[in-house]
């Protein structure tokens, strides 16, 4: 019970910190964009709007998963259910950030005429390399690898979450048969 409450509180705190951190990073990105040649364009503003939507969505994911952790019932294998929720959370956050950055970068390339990797600095390290020449196809080639990795991460983490729950159910059934 203490573990569930701690995990739920941690996820709620992470939601607040991710939104605040994302907002700080957004302000820094906007400052860099508007102080660089050609950065403060419609593409830069669209990039900022899409990035902000992704950050807010991540905060919503974390709050929803915190509520799910708080609603977990007592069971002999409660830690497995908790890990299952945390696996889903990790995949959903990665997917939201990947799709958000991919879409924002694609739009930035189309309307700003440059690859936005110079804006992402630390975030670029957790995603696959996305090239992006200042063309329509370059925008799409920036979007596709990020979307594919986001989709793959979501599928793998949800699979692992379901697998862990199936394992817990099997263990509970086995435990019940032993007792009877």
Image (cartoon, rainbow, N blue to C red):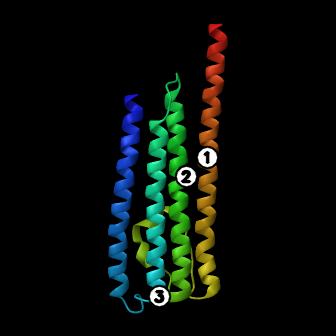
The C terminus - image quarter: top right
Query: In x, y percent, where is residue 93?
Result: 50, 56
- The residue carrying pointer 1 sits among few (fewer than 14), some (14 to 19) or many (20 or more) residues within 10 Å by Cα, namely many
Q: Distance between the residues labelled 2 and 3?
A: 31 Å
Q: Residue 29 carries which label?
A: none
- The residue carrying pointer 2 sits among few (fewer than 14), some (14 to 19) or many (20 or more) residues within 10 Å by Cα, namely many
The residue wearing badge 3 is 42
Q: Are marks 1 and 2 in contact (CB under 8 Å)?
A: yes
Q: Earlier in the sequence, mark 1 or mark 2?
A: 2
Above or below for 66 versus 15 = above
Residue beneath the point at 49% across and 41% down? 68
Pick the front one: 48 or 115? 48
The residue wearing badge 1 is 158
Classify residue 95 by image quadrant. bottom right
For the residue labelled by badge 1, is the local secondary structure a helix, a strand or a loop?
A: helix
Residue beneath the point at 54% across and 34% down? 81
For the residue labelled by badge 2, is the local secondary structure a helix, a strand or a loop?
A: helix
Q: Which of marks 3 and 1 is nearer the N terminus?
A: 3
Q: Residue 91 carries which label?
A: 2
**How many marks are shown on the rendered structure?**
3
Q: Distance between the residues labelled 3 and 1?
A: 37 Å
Residue beneath the point at 40% across and 39% down? 7
Above or below for 144 versus 94 = below
- Residue at the top extreme of this rendering: 180
């Amino acid at each position: 019970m203490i573990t569930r409450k701690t995990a739920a509180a941690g996820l709620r705190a992470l939601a607040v910190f991710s939104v605040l951190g994302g907002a700080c990073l957004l302000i820094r990105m906007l400052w860099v964009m508007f102080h660089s040649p050609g950065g403060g364009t419609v593409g830069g503003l669209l990039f900022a709007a899409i990035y902000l939507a992704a950050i807010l969505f991540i905060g919503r994911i974390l709050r929803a998963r915190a509520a799910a952790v708080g609603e977990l019932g007592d069971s002999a294998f409660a830690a497995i259910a908790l890990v299952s929720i945390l696996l889903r959370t990790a995949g959903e956050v990665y997917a939201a950030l990947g799709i958000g950055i991919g879409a924002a970068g694609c739009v930035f390339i189309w309307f700003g005429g440059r690859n936005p990797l110079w804006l992402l600095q630390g975030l670029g390290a957790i995603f696959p390399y996305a090239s992006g020449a200042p063309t329509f196809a370059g925008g799409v080639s920036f979007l596709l690898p990020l979307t594919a990795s986001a989709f793959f991460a979501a599928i793998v983490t949800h699979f692992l979450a379901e697998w862990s729950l199936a394992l817990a159910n099997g263990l509970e059934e086995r435990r019940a048969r032993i007792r009877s």
